[in-house]
Image (cartoon, rainbow, N blue to C red):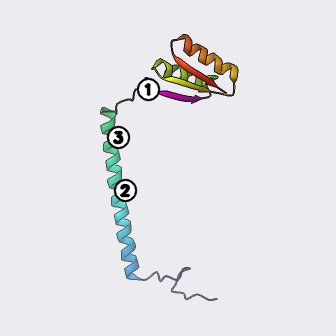
Amino acid sequence: MERNSEQNHVGVQPNNAGARVYSAIVLIFDLIMIFVQWTYFVFEGIYLLFKPPEEKSVAGEIVLITGTGHGIGRELALQYSALGATVVCWDINEEGNKETVKEICSRKGKAHAFV
């Protein structure tokens, strides 16, 4: 099947003036929108730099943390318990998980261990 030399692979004639004008308008609109969004996010970032949002209190909340048997999970569990949260510790390492719960309880915190 031969194609007409004036048509591209989808059958649209590239020399159509209306299509070119439409494409130019869409391009200009997209560039304006990108600039507006970029400007907004830059000013929002500067505003939040000087007036950050208030931190939420976790006192009295229940916090589920996975991987509390060691490492970052253990440290997160200890920090959340220090902030007054009830910590639900979940880890496949049963011994390390129980140690974390025991340490939280020794610091007057509330914690529960699950494997």
Q: Identify residue for label 3.
A: 45
In primary-sequence order, the first of circles 3 and 2 is 2
Callout 3: few (<14), some (14-19), or many (20+) C-alpha neighbours within 10 Å?
few
> Disc 1 designates what residue?
58
Quarter of the picture containing the N terminus is bottom right
**Residue 114, image x, y percentages:** 64, 26
Three-letter residue code for mark 1: Val
C-beta proximity under 8 Å, tags 3 and 1:
no
What percent of the width, then of the height, locates residue 18?
Answer: 37, 80
Say which element carries label 1.
loop
Which of label 3 and label 1 is nearer to you? 1
The reply to whether the magenta stretch includes residue 25 is no
Write down the quadrant of residue 51 in the picture: top left
* Identity of the residue drawn at 43% across and 26% down: 58
- In this rendered view, identify the residue nearer to me: 15 or 108: 108
SS state under label 3: helix
Which of the 4 quarters of the picture holds residue 44? top left
Label 2, secondary structure: give it. Answer: helix
Residue linked to disc 2: 34
Q: Which residues are magenta?
A: 55-68
Q: State the image coordinates of residue 103 (x, y, percent, origin top left).
A: 58, 14
Distance from the alpha carbon under mark 3 to that under mark 1: 26 Å
Give the side of residue 38 with respect to residue 101, left or right: left
Q: Measuring 51% from the left and 28% from the top, which residue is drawn there?
A: 63
Q: In the picture shown, does residue 71 fall above or below 53?
A: above
* Amino acid type, label 2: Ile
Q: CA distance from mark 1 to mark 2?
A: 38 Å
Residue in view at x 44 percent, y 23 percent: 60
Residue depicted at x 30% and y 43%: 43
Quarter of the image where the C terminus is located: top right
The amino acid marked with disc number 3 is Gly
Would residue 8 appear left or right of 16 to someone viewing this image?
Answer: right
